[in-house]
Image (tube, rainbow, N blue to C red):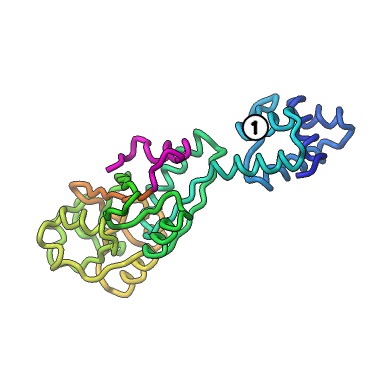
Amino acid sequence: MADEGLDVFRTVAGCGNNAAAARVLNKDPSCISRTISGLEKDYDTKLFDRRRKPFTLTESGLFLVNMIDNGLSTEQKLRRFVEERSSRQIRIGYSFPFSWHTLSRKISKLKRNDPDIMFRVSFADKTHIRNLLFENQLDLAVLPDKLHFRDYKIFEIISEYEWGVAVPSGVPVTDKQYVEPYDLEMLPLLVPAEQTCTEAISMWFGDSIKALRADSYDSTETMIGMMNEGFGYAFAPRADIPTLSKNNITFYPCSPKIMTSLYVYTRWNKDMSEELKTFLLSPEGQII
């Protein structure tokens, strides 16, 4: 971001649109547009809300205008802007695929309310995610087990997705629109590997779950492959219906509904960002 780019940005902010700024700067409007787009791409943020006429500055745009108007040097402007953007990141690590369904909904809601918040998301096995958390490389770690670590809080999110049984199309489990535990007696079932899912399913089945388990799976793709190889039917989240339908698999919701919990670990301290607190303390869950 050079001085010229900041001058273009400040002129657009003052004029309210690219065309007016181009007349002031004696430049082509397309050049103005490319300059602004380049700034937004470099720092992964929107500076203007272009849906309105004249353009409206976003929170990041207002922050940058204030830095420019306060007479900071280019180097100071850059450093302050980078620090501000970095402080508004939420770094999330998760260790099992099904957790992403619920997390993505929470992320989407927060992004709609505050588009400038950035998320850095990584997926790995639970040991690696736990180590990243302990090394302070993550703000949040989503793990399948409810454990207690010193200096960390556990946050429980109840999944918004109900679960059901997936079966190859043309082979109905029942003539009803949903299944109940007794509908699945003596059928081989694929059960997700995650502890939280297994616990919820066990409560639904009662003591009979062990006799029904055929094997476990850790992703939708694995589950579909095992079903195609004849391993049996499978439990799956409702969120997977689009993928299942493309593979000629029918979804039967369970009755009563099966809901699962996600266990989110974070180092809760006085320096926690407001963005992270908003993410954690939304209505979908609570600190436990």
Q: Quadrant of the C terminus?
A: top left
Q: Residue at x 37, y 53 (%)?
A: 142
> Where does residue 170 sit, x and y in percent of width and height?
28, 63
Image position, residue 182 (x, y; %): 11, 57
Residue 285, magenta (yes or no): yes
Q: Quadrant of residue 30?
A: top right
- Image coordinates of residue 268 in percent, x first then y, are 38, 43
Question: Which of 225/112 is in front?
Answer: 112
Confirm whether the magenta stretch covers residue 240: no
Q: Residue at x 34, y 49 (%)?
A: 152
Tell me the residue at 39%/63% (across/down): 247
Compared to 52, does 238 lie above or below?
below
Give the residue pinned by disc 1.
Answer: 63
Mark 1 crowd level (few <14, some 14–19, many ≥20, 10 Å Cα) = some
> Horizontal placement of 3 versus 157: left or right?
right
In this rendering, the answer to whether 57 lies above or below 255 is: above
Query: Where does residue 214 sit, x and y in percent of width and height?
Result: 21, 71
Q: Which quadrant would the N terminus be assigned to in this image? A: top right
Region rendered in magenta: 267-288
